[in-house]
Image (cartoon, rainbow, N blue to C red):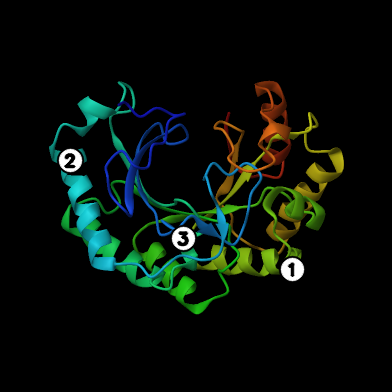
Amino acid sequence: MRLTHENHDRDLAGLTYIYPVVSRRAQGVSVGINLNPNNACNFRCAYCQVPELVLGKAPEIDVERLIRELESLLDWVLEGDFMEKVVPEGSRRLNDLAFSGNGEPTSAAEFDIIVQRVGEVMQRRGLLHKIKLVLITNGSLIHQAHVQRGLAHFNELGGEVWFKLDSATEAGQARINDFHAGLARVTENLTLCAGLAPTWIQSCALAMDGEAPSRDERDALLGFLKARLAEGIQLQGVLLYGLARQSHQPEAPRLSALDEAWMESWGAELRALGLEVRVSL
Protein backbone atom coordinates (compact mmCIF):
# COMPACT_ATOMS: atom_id res chain seq x y z
CA MET A 1 0.00 0.00 0.00
CA ARG A 2 1.20 3.51 -0.80
CA LEU A 3 0.46 6.44 1.44
CA THR A 4 -0.96 9.54 -0.24
CA HIS A 5 -2.13 12.97 0.90
CA GLU A 6 -5.66 11.55 1.08
CA ASN A 7 -4.79 8.15 2.59
CA HIS A 8 -3.41 8.53 6.12
CA ASP A 9 -3.56 4.87 7.18
CA ARG A 10 -2.40 5.00 10.80
CA ASP A 11 -2.33 1.19 10.98
CA LEU A 12 0.16 0.83 8.12
CA ALA A 13 3.18 0.25 10.37
CA GLY A 14 1.23 -1.97 12.79
CA LEU A 15 2.23 0.12 15.82
CA THR A 16 0.25 1.53 18.75
CA TYR A 17 1.67 5.02 19.14
CA ILE A 18 3.71 5.76 16.01
CA TYR A 19 2.48 6.10 12.43
CA PRO A 20 3.77 7.56 9.15
CA VAL A 21 1.84 9.95 6.90
CA VAL A 22 2.52 11.86 3.72
CA SER A 23 1.69 15.45 4.61
CA ARG A 24 0.33 17.75 1.92
CA ARG A 25 1.37 20.75 3.98
CA ALA A 26 4.89 19.43 4.63
CA GLN A 27 5.35 17.87 1.15
CA GLY A 28 7.17 14.98 2.75
CA VAL A 29 6.86 12.20 5.31
CA SER A 30 5.68 13.06 8.80
CA VAL A 31 6.18 10.54 11.59
CA GLY A 32 3.14 10.89 13.82
CA ILE A 33 3.12 10.34 17.57
CA ASN A 34 -0.39 9.33 18.63
CA LEU A 35 -1.01 9.73 22.35
CA ASN A 36 -4.73 9.00 21.93
CA PRO A 37 -5.00 5.39 20.68
CA ASN A 38 -8.31 5.26 22.55
CA ASN A 39 -9.83 7.79 20.07
CA ALA A 40 -10.55 10.18 22.94
CA CYS A 41 -10.56 13.97 22.66
CA ASN A 42 -11.97 16.91 24.59
CA PHE A 43 -13.07 18.52 21.28
CA ARG A 44 -15.38 17.00 18.69
CA CYS A 45 -14.61 18.87 15.50
CA ALA A 46 -17.24 18.49 12.79
CA TYR A 47 -14.55 17.68 10.22
CA CYS A 48 -12.64 15.14 12.38
CA GLN A 49 -11.57 12.08 10.42
CA VAL A 50 -11.27 9.83 13.51
CA PRO A 51 -13.96 7.11 13.53
CA GLU A 52 -15.71 6.25 16.79
CA LEU A 53 -14.41 9.42 18.44
CA VAL A 54 -15.26 9.64 22.15
CA LEU A 55 -15.16 12.44 24.69
CA GLY A 56 -12.24 12.03 27.04
CA LYS A 57 -8.47 12.18 27.45
CA ALA A 58 -5.46 10.10 26.56
CA PRO A 59 -5.01 6.79 28.40
CA GLU A 60 -1.92 5.96 30.43
CA ILE A 61 0.95 5.83 27.94
CA ASP A 62 3.53 3.05 27.87
CA VAL A 63 6.44 5.43 27.32
CA GLU A 64 9.05 2.72 26.78
CA ARG A 65 6.91 1.06 24.11
CA LEU A 66 6.36 4.40 22.40
CA ILE A 67 10.11 5.04 22.23
CA ARG A 68 10.79 1.51 20.92
CA GLU A 69 8.16 2.03 18.21
CA LEU A 70 9.64 5.40 17.26
CA GLU A 71 13.14 3.95 17.01
CA SER A 72 11.83 1.04 14.91
CA LEU A 73 9.97 3.23 12.43
CA LEU A 74 12.89 5.63 12.13
CA ASP A 75 15.11 2.63 11.32
CA TRP A 76 12.73 1.71 8.49
CA VAL A 77 12.39 5.29 7.22
CA LEU A 78 16.05 6.34 7.48
CA GLU A 79 17.88 3.08 6.81
CA GLY A 80 15.38 0.73 5.16
CA ASP A 81 13.15 0.58 2.09
CA PHE A 82 10.20 2.54 3.52
CA MET A 83 10.44 5.43 1.07
CA GLU A 84 10.59 3.22 -2.01
CA LYS A 85 7.88 0.82 -0.86
CA VAL A 86 5.36 3.19 0.68
CA VAL A 87 5.89 6.82 -0.39
CA PRO A 88 5.19 8.27 -3.84
CA GLU A 89 7.99 10.01 -5.72
CA GLY A 90 8.25 13.67 -4.87
CA SER A 91 7.56 13.13 -1.16
CA ARG A 92 10.45 10.85 -0.26
CA ARG A 93 12.01 12.87 2.52
CA LEU A 94 11.52 12.91 6.29
CA ASN A 95 10.09 16.30 7.16
CA ASP A 96 9.05 16.12 10.80
CA LEU A 97 8.01 14.30 13.93
CA ALA A 98 4.51 15.44 14.86
CA PHE A 99 2.54 15.00 18.06
CA SER A 100 -0.82 14.41 16.43
CA GLY A 101 -3.24 11.52 16.22
CA ASN A 102 -6.69 10.45 17.33
CA GLY A 103 -7.30 13.09 19.99
CA GLU A 104 -5.71 15.93 21.95
CA PRO A 105 -2.06 14.95 22.65
CA THR A 106 -1.59 17.32 25.58
CA SER A 107 -4.27 15.40 27.50
CA ALA A 108 -1.66 12.70 28.17
CA ALA A 109 -0.37 12.95 31.74
CA GLU A 110 3.07 11.90 30.48
CA PHE A 111 3.20 14.59 27.76
CA ASP A 112 6.22 16.45 29.11
CA ILE A 113 8.17 13.24 29.77
CA ILE A 114 7.44 11.97 26.25
CA VAL A 115 8.58 15.23 24.65
CA GLN A 116 11.87 14.97 26.54
CA ARG A 117 12.37 11.33 25.52
CA VAL A 118 11.55 12.05 21.87
CA GLY A 119 14.12 14.83 21.97
CA GLU A 120 16.71 12.32 23.19
CA VAL A 121 15.91 10.06 20.21
CA MET A 122 16.31 12.99 17.83
CA GLN A 123 19.64 13.89 19.45
CA ARG A 124 20.99 10.34 19.13
CA ARG A 125 20.04 10.18 15.46
CA GLY A 126 21.38 13.59 14.55
CA LEU A 127 17.90 14.90 13.69
CA LEU A 128 17.77 17.92 15.98
CA HIS A 129 17.36 21.14 13.97
CA LYS A 130 17.45 19.08 10.76
CA ILE A 131 13.78 18.06 10.80
CA LYS A 132 10.86 19.75 12.48
CA LEU A 133 9.28 18.76 15.77
CA VAL A 134 5.60 19.77 15.71
CA LEU A 135 2.77 19.75 18.24
CA ILE A 136 -0.70 19.86 16.67
CA THR A 137 -3.04 20.90 19.47
CA ASN A 138 -6.44 22.42 20.12
CA GLY A 139 -4.73 24.54 22.78
CA SER A 140 -7.36 23.88 25.43
CA LEU A 141 -4.97 22.48 28.08
CA ILE A 142 -2.00 24.87 27.75
CA HIS A 143 -2.78 26.30 31.20
CA GLN A 144 -1.83 22.96 32.82
CA ALA A 145 1.65 22.72 34.33
CA HIS A 146 2.74 19.47 32.65
CA VAL A 147 1.76 20.86 29.24
CA GLN A 148 3.79 24.00 29.84
CA ARG A 149 6.80 21.89 30.83
CA GLY A 150 6.39 19.97 27.57
CA LEU A 151 6.23 23.21 25.58
CA ALA A 152 9.41 24.43 27.25
CA HIS A 153 11.08 21.20 26.04
CA PHE A 154 9.67 21.88 22.57
CA ASN A 155 11.32 25.27 22.54
CA GLU A 156 14.67 23.78 23.60
CA LEU A 157 14.39 21.23 20.78
CA GLY A 158 13.61 23.84 18.14
CA GLY A 159 10.00 22.67 17.88
CA GLU A 160 6.86 24.58 16.98
CA VAL A 161 3.20 24.46 17.96
CA TRP A 162 0.20 24.49 15.62
CA PHE A 163 -2.63 25.95 17.73
CA LYS A 164 -6.12 25.23 16.39
CA LEU A 165 -8.38 28.25 15.91
CA ASP A 166 -11.20 27.62 13.45
CA SER A 167 -13.47 30.33 14.82
CA ALA A 168 -13.17 33.35 17.11
CA THR A 169 -16.83 33.39 18.12
CA GLU A 170 -18.24 31.24 20.88
CA ALA A 171 -21.11 30.16 18.61
CA GLY A 172 -18.66 29.16 15.89
CA GLN A 173 -16.46 27.22 18.29
CA ALA A 174 -19.49 25.37 19.60
CA ARG A 175 -20.71 24.58 16.07
CA ILE A 176 -17.38 23.55 14.54
CA ASN A 177 -15.39 22.19 17.48
CA ASP A 178 -18.01 21.43 20.16
CA PHE A 179 -15.91 23.65 22.44
CA HIS A 180 -17.64 25.73 25.10
CA ALA A 181 -14.95 27.12 27.43
CA GLY A 182 -15.07 30.57 25.87
CA LEU A 183 -12.76 33.03 24.15
CA ALA A 184 -11.14 34.18 27.40
CA ARG A 185 -9.65 30.70 27.86
CA VAL A 186 -8.51 30.65 24.21
CA THR A 187 -6.83 34.04 24.65
CA GLU A 188 -5.13 32.98 27.89
CA ASN A 189 -3.84 29.73 26.46
CA LEU A 190 -2.67 31.22 23.17
CA THR A 191 -0.75 33.87 25.11
CA LEU A 192 0.88 31.20 27.29
CA CYS A 193 1.65 29.00 24.30
CA ALA A 194 3.29 31.71 22.20
CA GLY A 195 5.39 32.71 25.19
CA LEU A 196 6.74 29.19 25.60
CA ALA A 197 7.38 28.00 22.03
CA PRO A 198 7.08 29.27 18.43
CA THR A 199 3.37 29.13 17.65
CA TRP A 200 1.38 29.03 14.42
CA ILE A 201 -2.39 29.40 14.21
CA GLN A 202 -3.89 26.46 12.30
CA SER A 203 -7.34 27.21 10.97
CA CYS A 204 -9.69 25.01 8.96
CA ALA A 205 -12.12 26.72 6.58
CA LEU A 206 -15.02 24.77 5.13
CA ALA A 207 -18.61 25.12 3.98
CA MET A 208 -21.42 23.88 6.22
CA ASP A 209 -24.79 23.34 4.58
CA GLY A 210 -23.30 24.93 1.47
CA GLU A 211 -22.40 28.16 3.28
CA ALA A 212 -18.84 29.41 3.65
CA PRO A 213 -17.82 31.12 6.93
CA SER A 214 -19.84 34.33 7.15
CA ARG A 215 -18.45 37.83 6.95
CA ASP A 216 -19.12 38.18 10.69
CA GLU A 217 -17.18 34.99 11.40
CA ARG A 218 -14.22 36.11 9.32
CA ASP A 219 -14.23 39.59 10.85
CA ALA A 220 -14.26 38.04 14.33
CA LEU A 221 -11.16 35.98 13.55
CA LEU A 222 -9.39 38.95 11.99
CA GLY A 223 -10.27 41.05 15.03
CA PHE A 224 -9.11 38.38 17.46
CA LEU A 225 -5.74 38.00 15.77
CA LYS A 226 -5.29 41.75 15.39
CA ALA A 227 -5.93 42.21 19.12
CA ARG A 228 -3.41 39.52 20.06
CA LEU A 229 -0.75 41.07 17.83
CA ALA A 230 -1.46 44.48 19.38
CA GLU A 231 -0.86 42.92 22.80
CA GLY A 232 2.60 41.88 21.63
CA ILE A 233 1.96 38.16 21.21
CA GLN A 234 4.49 36.73 18.76
CA LEU A 235 2.79 34.47 16.22
CA GLN A 236 4.69 32.71 13.45
CA GLY A 237 1.73 32.97 11.08
CA VAL A 238 -1.41 31.15 10.00
CA LEU A 239 -1.70 27.68 8.49
CA LEU A 240 -5.00 27.90 6.61
CA TYR A 241 -6.28 24.61 5.27
CA GLY A 242 -9.42 23.20 3.73
CA LEU A 243 -11.48 20.03 3.93
CA ALA A 244 -9.29 17.37 2.32
CA ARG A 245 -10.44 14.07 3.86
CA GLN A 246 -13.73 12.49 4.82
CA SER A 247 -15.17 13.41 8.21
CA HIS A 248 -16.37 10.56 10.40
CA GLN A 249 -18.64 12.79 12.48
CA PRO A 250 -22.44 13.12 12.21
CA GLU A 251 -22.01 16.48 10.43
CA ALA A 252 -20.13 14.86 7.54
CA PRO A 253 -22.99 15.09 4.99
CA ARG A 254 -23.31 18.81 5.73
CA LEU A 255 -19.66 19.63 5.00
CA SER A 256 -17.96 20.51 1.73
CA ALA A 257 -14.66 22.01 0.62
CA LEU A 258 -14.27 25.63 -0.42
CA ASP A 259 -12.69 26.36 -3.78
CA GLU A 260 -9.17 27.66 -4.30
CA ALA A 261 -10.26 31.20 -5.12
CA TRP A 262 -12.22 31.51 -1.85
CA MET A 263 -9.35 30.10 0.19
CA GLU A 264 -6.77 32.37 -1.43
CA SER A 265 -8.99 35.40 -0.92
CA TRP A 266 -9.41 34.58 2.77
CA GLY A 267 -5.68 33.97 3.04
CA ALA A 268 -5.02 37.42 1.59
CA GLU A 269 -7.22 39.01 4.27
CA LEU A 270 -5.27 37.23 7.00
CA ARG A 271 -2.00 38.20 5.34
CA ALA A 272 -3.03 41.85 5.52
CA LEU A 273 -2.58 41.63 9.31
CA GLY A 274 1.15 41.29 8.65
CA LEU A 275 1.22 37.54 9.25
CA GLU A 276 2.74 34.87 7.06
CA VAL A 277 -0.14 32.72 5.73
CA ARG A 278 0.24 29.31 4.11
CA VAL A 279 -2.82 28.01 2.27
CA SER A 280 -3.41 24.27 1.75
CA LEU A 281 -6.50 22.99 -0.05
Question: Could you say which is closer to the camera, residue 270 or residue 30?
Answer: 30
Question: Could you say which is closer to the camera, residue 169 or residue 132?
Answer: 169
Q: Determine the secondary structure under disc 2.
A: helix
Q: Position of residue 52 (x, y in %)?
A: 53, 49
| Residue at position x 45%, y 67% in the image | 151
In the displayed structure, does residue 280 sit left or right of residue 127?
A: right
At label 3, counting other C-alpha atoms closer than 10 Å, the crowd grade (few under 14, some 14-19, many 20 or more) is many
Residue type at mark 2 is Trp
Whether the residues at callouts 2 and 3 have beta carbons within 8 Å, the answer is no
Which residue in the protein does label 3 denote? 105
- Which of the marked residues, 3 or 1, is nearer the chain's N terminus? 3
Whether the residues at callouts 3 and 1 have beta carbons within 8 Å, the answer is no
At label 2, counting other C-alpha atoms closer than 10 Å, the crowd grade (few under 14, some 14-19, many 20 or more) is few
Which residue, as the protein is rendered here, is positioned at the far front?
A: 52
Q: Position of residue 234 (x, y in %)?
A: 59, 58
- Which of the marked residues, 2 or 1, is nearer the chain's N terminus? 2
Above or below, 27 against 261 in this view is below
At label 1, counting other C-alpha atoms closer than 10 Å, the crowd grade (few under 14, some 14-19, many 20 or more) is few
Tell me where residue 260 sits by quadrant: top right
Which residue in the protein does label 1 denote? 184
Task: Using the numbered discs, state the Cα–Cα distance from disc 2 to disc 3 in whole angstroms.
Answer: 24 Å
Q: Position of residue 66 (x, y in %)?
A: 27, 60
